[in-house]
Image (tube, rainbow, N blue to C red):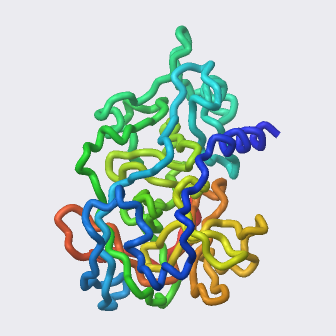
Amino acid sequence: MRIGILYLAFHSVLVSAHSDGAHTDFAANIGLPALFNREALVEDIRAVDCTLSEGSKSRCWQLKLKAAPRHHMGPWCPRTIRDPITASGMMFIKQQVVATDGPFVKNAAEFFSDPKWVLYNEKTGRVKVTDTKRACELAARPDVAPEFNNYCVECLASYLGDNFYTTYLIPIKPLTAKSPQSSNDHSGYGVAFNGVKFDISAPVGAILGAHTLAPVDACGGHVNPHVGYHYHAALGCSQAYPSAASHAPIIGIAIDGYLIYARENTDGREPKDLDECRGHEFANLGYHYHVNLAVENDILHCLKGERGCALGKNQSQCNFSGSRASKLQKPE
């Protein structure tokens, strides 16, 4: 019961999705560049030659994007064991939405049945939080530095500076892959129209294994020093565009070029014919994805098209060497 109440509490503070009144026809008639927030664009979107994950030569959109959500980012970590839900974030643990508020931090050892969980100063009740850029860099990674075991990990967008952005190459015309593909933590599943990455599942096992918490906010996002602010769940905070009369709105584009739609149609239900990647074809909308429930810790399950990528530093083309694209792994 408490979990259900917490979930509703978080959703009560979600920001309504922005819509400019456009219709899905713009996806073809106006084109992808018109869908992105102008403030998210570092430079105009352009078409470039690219090579996709299975070696196909294609044309891609080159998008240089910075995260520019129109909603508030945070909060994430409580500062004391008395702080309420509204002063903290949440995590997806054991198929539950768990509020990482002060009382949860205080009782973490009981929740996890592990006495090694001590995330706060027992004398003062102050929660141990990574409150500097250096601490963020050492803790917000799979191999958490030992000195930051038993911390609530929180990074701020301000640590990244004003010039932080990500360059994506996304196929203009999606090409079906030979088999369903996984993505990686650099490219993610795709990107919302506010420039925020739809990331792959959070490495909950590694996070909890270091006796750390890495909460997301009420919009499903948090910051790390390599990706910036990114989503691990799609909770209706990013802007959305109406699609077909009864269908879910469009909320982003996947790294393989197919569009990403919200989970539920206008009747409050998700489509019944979704495939293993959470995609299907509907009316004249073509193949597209619908996002997953937050508790699944996996916005999509896989990708049906050949992938583009998020470019690394000094890269101009995607590098898929060593990629195991068809090996799909269940999120933790």
Q: Quadrant of the C terminus?
A: bottom right
Name above or below for residue 74 compared with residue 183: above
> Residue 247 at what x, y percent from top left?
68, 75
| Residue that sits furthest to the front in the current view | 21
Q: Is residue 192 visible?
A: yes
Front residue of 101/18: it is: 18
Q: Is residue 209 visible?
A: no
Determine the image quadrant of residue 317.
bottom left
Name above or below for residue 281 compared with residue 234: below
> Residue 78 at what x, y percent from top left?
54, 27
Residue at image coords 41%, 61%: 37
Front residue of 160/237: it is: 237
Left or right, 239 with reference to 65: right
For the image, the number of numbered tags is 0
Left or right, 132 with reference to 299: left
Determine the image quadrant of residue 25.
bottom right
Q: Quadrant of the N terminus?
A: top right
> Residue 315 at what x, y percent from top left?
20, 69
Residue at image coords 45%, 68%: 190
Front residue of 280/53: it is: 280
| Residue that sits furthest to the right in the current view | 1
| Residue that sits furthest to the top in the current view | 123
Front residue of 11/327: it is: 11
Residue at image coords 60%, 41%: 90
> Residue 67 at what x, y percent from top left?
38, 53
Residue at image coords 61%, 51%: 16
